Image (cartoon, rainbow, N blue to C red):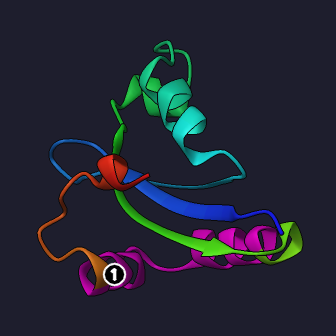
Amino acid sequence: MDTHYVYILTNKSHTVLYVGRSKQLKQRLIQHKNNSTSTFTGKYNVHKLVYFETTKYVNNSIKRERQIKKWKREWKINLINGLNPDWKDLSEYI
């Protein structure tokens, strides 16, 4: 079974939240950090991993990503706070 990730990135001031998904999260985080300013994450310096969850199936990760993207900001913040109340960069755990 493969592992698929759904994740949330933020910037230093926590004003921007970005929801994504990937099969290879470590490589995807590197891509985000190396993005040019023409991309959303590059333009707003959204590189800090503050939340992630895993699923076994790609369809579940797609469904979950879409679900979280539709959420109000407050709900996303509550999700992050439940796992990572200090909003530490979790990329070292990947």
Count every numbered label the image shows and give the total.
1
Viewed as shown, does residue 36 lie left or right of 56?
left
Residue 30 screen position, x and y as percent: 49, 27
Front position in the image: 16 or 52? 52
- Left or right: residue 42 compared with residue 14: right
- In x, y percent, where is residue 70? 62, 75
Q: Is residue 66 magenta?
A: yes
Residue placed under numbered mark 1 in the picture: 74
Residue 69 horizontal/vertical position (percent): 60, 68
**Looking at the image, residue 12 lies above or below residue 59:** above
Q: Rate crowding at label 1 as few (under 14), some (14 to 19) or many (20 or more) other CA atoms within 10 Å.
A: few
Question: Element at badge 1?
Answer: helix
Q: Which residues are magenta?
A: 61-82
Q: Quadrant of the N terminus?
A: bottom right
Residue 12 showing in the rendered view: yes
Q: Residue 68: give x, y in percent of width and height.
A: 58, 75
Please check the rendered image and state whether residue 2 is part of the magenta-colored stretch, yes or no: no
Kindly identify the residue that appears in the image at 31 percent across and 47 percent down: 92
Q: Residue at x 32, y 75 (%)?
A: 80
Write the residue at 40% across / 85% down.
75
User: Which of 1 and 29 lies nearest the eye of the viewer?
Assistant: 1
Relative depth, front residue between 67 and 94 = 94
Q: Residue furthest right?
A: 59
